Amino acid sequence: MARAELNAAKAAKKDEFYTQFVDIEKEMNAYLEYDENVFRDKTILLPCDDPEWSNFTKYFAQNFERLGLKKLISTSYAPDARLINKQPTLFETTNPNFDEVKSSSQGRIFSLTRDVNNDNRLDVNDLEWSYLEGDGDFRSEEVCELRDEADIIVTNPPFSLFREFISWIYSAEKTFVVIGNLNAITYKEVFPRVQANKLWLGATNFNTGMYFRVPDDFVYAPTYKFEREINGVSVNRVPSVCWFTNIDHGRRHQPLSLMTVADNKKFSKHKEICGIGYRNYDNYEAIEVPYTDAIPSDYPGVMGVPITFLDKYSPEQFEILGATQRGCHDEVPDTKKYDDYWEVRPDGSKTGSSGGKTNENANLEGNDGKKNYFINGEGHIIQSAYQRIFIRHRMVQA
Ligand SMILES: C[S@@+](CC[C@H](N)C(=O)[O-])C[C@H]1O[C@@H](n2cnc3c(N)ncnc32)[C@H](O)[C@@H]1O
């Protein structure tokens, strides 16, 4: 199989990873703790969710009354449009609405608004369903209309379409809670909104990665060394996955407890800081802070921090000024270009690339011997730090 096909197949498999009930419950509880009426009288749309597999549908249907929902809508993608899980479910084939022709090519819409079975409660057994006109693509006109009708959009969307999915939500300016990869923070569709405090990370700490339910015939990567089964279902761990939202929660208002510059220099557990202090970038007026717990409490200037900082970001404590991503650092402009440098491998051989490659990355003087570095005619060596976000304390004066 060609590499492009392999990558497409890999992405398609991840598009069929299902979120565990416990992860959804934990995250929604954080919003409810902060505001118990957050979902009250709201119409919730779950636009990538077949109740057969989706715990989002199960969670909101099961908690419909407790949350005080007005309406729950869950739409699913047609089996023909998916690369796997193509069989119609037992739920569908045994239902009077079942239509063999529509079943493979059309999506479904499930809604919950009333006590259909007259058992005096609204729950998953009161979901009503029919086929959509099209395949249920979230970008289709009919699903866009449902988005416009909804107050809040919640889901784990197809990983391969995350960018489009976020733009789709924002084009209707909706409230949302969605799962995505942490790297999406630096997307141009995401970062400016993070900076403007219109989008932030959810409450669940993502350090341990997240386990998703996978089809039973899922083939694990040869290097996979994590749990394969939780509560009797096959799972796969995905690292660096987090929740993105614009619903407030308590964790983002808890300030980080930090040490001063002087104490970090004396006591930091990080060898890059202990006994050394903080280094200035070669091309930004900012200091390099390689770990979130090493952010000094009393530094008044600009600091470059890893993107994982956002998991601990409190907007009352810090201001986000930009990121190393191209087009994201107007407020912290780079002060140098490296077009007359060339790239060198750790063994000293030239890669053939110009130093222009590292323009706008946050660069440090020197070479750690582990990664490629850049050098100019005068023997000046620099190496790029990883992706960085530029921040400043709100309460520390120069
Ligand atoms: C990562 S899975 C998550 C499913 C479910 N939301 C959950 O968390 O358990 C993404 C789902 O989106 C569906 N999907 C893929 N492309 C889609 C599209 N363009 N429009 C709507 N759904 C899509 C896939 O079939 C898959 O079921």
Image (spheres, helix red, strand yellow):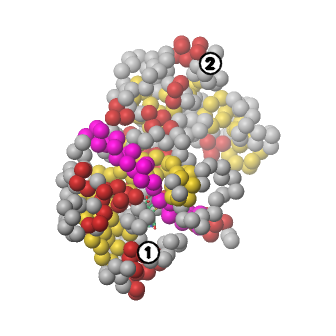
Residues 253 and 193: in front is 253
Residue 73 in the magenta stretch? The answer is: no
To which quarter of the image does residue 32 belong? top left
Q: Earlier in the sequence, mark 2 or mark 1?
A: 1
Query: Which image quadrant: the C terminus?
Result: top left
Ligand 1 position by quadrant: bottom left
- Residue visible at 45% across and 37% down? 311
Mark 1 C-beta to ligand 1 under 8 Å:
no
Of discs 2 and 1, which sits in the foreground? 1
Measuring from the top left, give residue 191's x and y in whole percent. Answer: 42, 45
Measuring from the top left, give residue 336's x and y in whole percent. Answer: 57, 34
Measuring from the top left, give residue 174's x and y in whole percent. Answer: 28, 54
Q: Report helix, strand or loop for mark 1.
A: loop
- Residue visible at 80% across and 40% down? 347
- Residue visible at 25% across and 40% down? 35
Measuring from the top left, give residue 327's x and y in whole percent. Answer: 46, 45
- Residue visible at 62% across and 31% down? 364
Q: Is residue 358 left or right of residue 398?
A: right
Q: Which mark is residue 352?
A: none
Q: What residue is disc 1 on?
A: 89
| Mark 2 burial class by Cα count in 10 Å: few <14, some 14-19, many 20+ | some
Q: Is residue 221 left or right of residue 133?
A: right
The three-letter amino acid code for the residue at tag 1 is Thr
The three-letter amino acid code for the residue at tag 2 is Cys
Main SS, magenta region, reads: helix
Residue 15 in the magenta stretch? The answer is: yes
Q: What residue is disc 2 on?
A: 274
Q: Is residue 126 visible?
A: yes
Q: Report helix, strand or loop for mark 2.
A: loop
Q: Which residues are magenta?
A: 9-35
Tell me the distance, in whole angstroms, between the alpha carbons under discs 2 and 1: 59 Å
| Mark 1 burial class by Cα count in 10 Å: few <14, some 14-19, many 20+ | few
